[in-house]
Amino acid sequence: MEERKYTTVSIPVTLYRRLESMIQGTGFRSVSEYVTYLLREIVAMKEGREPTLSPEEIEEIKRRLKALGYL
């Protein structure tokens, strides 16, 4: 059996649209790419590794995720 390289994670459509709007004009090509980046940063923090985001960016992400009920 072949191992899948990706899986699907469902998020509310309204959140998807907000993220889509947020990444306009950035280097991110898709919402999936952006969400993958954010999750990698959060996992790195939880594992005690140094994130690549600034402390201010991390706090903003945490604030938004908490407001959405994810933290």
Image (tube, rainbow, N blue to C red):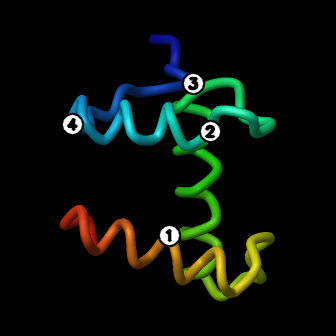
Q: Quadrant of residue 58?
A: bottom right
Q: Is residue 21 above or below residue 8?
A: below
Q: Is residue 9 above or below residue 36?
A: above
Cα–Cα gap, marks 1 and 4: 17 Å
Residue 23, which numbered label? 2
Is 67 situated left or right of 56 in this image?
left
* Residue carrying label 4: 12
* Residue carrying label 3: 5
Badge 2 marks a residue whose secondary structure is loop
Cα–Cα gap, marks 4 and 2: 17 Å
Badge 4 marks a residue whose secondary structure is loop
Viewer-nearest of discs 4 and 2: 2
What's the amino acid at mark 4?
Pro
* Residue carrying label 1: 61
Classify the position of the C terminus by image quarter.
Answer: bottom left
Residues at discs 2 and 3 in contact (Cβ within 8 Å): no
Residues at discs 4 and 3 in contact (Cβ within 8 Å): no
Residue 3, given in percent of the width and then of the height, sits at: 51, 21
Viewer-nearest of discs 1 and 3: 1
Residues at discs 1 and 4 in contact (Cβ within 8 Å): no
Cα–Cα gap, marks 2 and 3: 24 Å
